Image: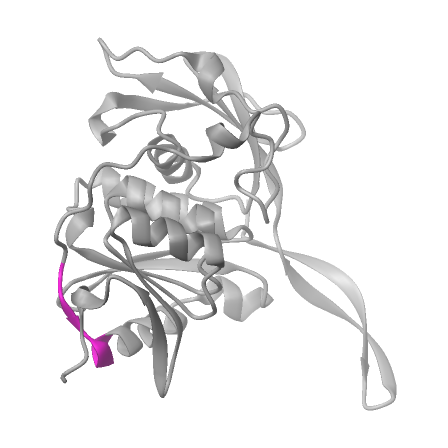
């Protein structure tokens, strides 16, 4: 399934009307099971589903370490929907009911469907010291992310999350109609390669939300930078967990909300 889907549109511009075909971001459901027990249905852009599953399992606290997930097994789907079983490694046991969502999670809300407020928060281990990066490099990293957002260029409707080393080396980008799913796909990619996430900088193409801060912290990422604002709850959580959060990272400067010791301003 492609990340974009053609649809007919009527384009109105400068008082003129024209029919044409446009590319829309693809949005389809995916179901995750844990040891055969259904636990979640997410709306996502198809592609990199195994990475999505691995990242989801880690950032939702289903597993504590990547090696605790032995396999992501594809199952027969209905009407083109994806369906995957998360198979735990031998000796790893969890309570499947603890992670079951009452409803599905939409592309705009990764915490929707959780049964209680307590279930929204996932425990995060103390973050590592992490890298110290020059302020100018943070601007460069966001520009680098934008240059590889092929899905956004085609549709104008996909969020992105990208990872870089503390020295600025590009490690990968993932796009999705949901910002939380883009993050999960990226975390799944990084964790499957056993790359040290505590030494990385992650950039996101939109606002920095509570759920993105939580997912980053649970994965062990210590610097998170967004193109738009951070929410109040995201900043409060980042401050509590020790995560460095920057927002409005655009040419000319940015806002540094929490734990500025990881950003070298040159002063």
The answer to whether one can see residue 41 in this image is yes
Q: Residue at x 22, y 8 (%)?
A: 91
Q: Is residue 183 left or right of residue 158?
A: left
* Residue toward you, 49 or 195: 195
Tell me where residue 179 appears, x and y as whole percent.
49, 53
The residue depicted at 73 percent of the width and 67 percent of the height is 21
In the rendered image, the quadrant that contains the C terminus is bottom left
Residue furthest to the bottom in view is 14
Count of numbered badges drawn on the protein? 0
Residue 85: x percent and y percent? Answer: 44, 20
Q: Which residues are magenta?
A: 131-137
Q: Is residue 86 left or right of residue 219?
A: right
Report the colour scheme.
one colour
Query: Viewer-proximal residue, 32 or 23?
Result: 32
**Among the 4 quarters of the image, the one containing residue 42:** top right
- Above or below, 252 relative to 208: below
Residue 185 in sight here = no
Q: Identify whether 29 is placed above or below 251.
A: above
Q: Quadrant of residue 265?
A: bottom left
* Screen quadrant of the N terminus: top right
Say whether residue 199 is magenta: no
Residue shown at the point (60%, 31%) measured from the top left: 113
Would residue 243 appear left or right of 117 to someone viewing this image? left
Q: Position of residue 245 (x, y in %)?
A: 33, 62
* Rendered image quadrant of residue 52: top left
């Amino acid at each position: 399934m492609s990340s974009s889907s053609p649809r007919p549109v009527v384009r109105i511009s400068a008082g003129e009307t024209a029919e044409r075909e446009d590319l829309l971001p693809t949005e389809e459901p995916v179901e995750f099971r844990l040891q055969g027990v259904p636990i979640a249905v997410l709306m996502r852009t198809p592609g990199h589903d195994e990475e999505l599953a691995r990242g989801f399992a880690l950032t939702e606290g289903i597993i504590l370490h990547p090696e605790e997930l032995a396999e992501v097994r594809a199952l027969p789907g209905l009407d083109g929907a994806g369906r995957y079983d998360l198979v735990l490694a031998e000796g790893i046991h969890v309570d499947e009911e603890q992670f079951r969502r009452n409803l599905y999670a939409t592309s705009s809300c990764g915490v929707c469907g959780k049964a209680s407020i307590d279930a929204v928060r996932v425990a995060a281990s103390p973050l590592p010291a992490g890298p110290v990066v020059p302020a100018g490099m943070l601007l460069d990293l966001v520009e680098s992310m934008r240059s590889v957002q092929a899905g956004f260029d085609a549709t104008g409707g996909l969020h992105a999350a990208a990872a870089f080393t503390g020295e600025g080396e590009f490690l990968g980008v993932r796009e999705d109609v949901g910002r939380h799913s883009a993050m999960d796909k990226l975390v799944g990619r990084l964790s499957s390669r056993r790359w040290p996430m505590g030494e990385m900088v992650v950039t996101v193409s939109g606002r920095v939300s509570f759920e993105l801060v939580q997912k980053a912290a649970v994965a062990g990422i210590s610097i998170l930078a967004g193109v738009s604002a951070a929410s109040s709850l995201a900043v409060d959580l980042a401050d509590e967990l020790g995560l460095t959060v920057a927002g409005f990272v655009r040419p000319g400067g940015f806002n540094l909300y929490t734990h500025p010791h990881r950003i070298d301003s040159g002063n």
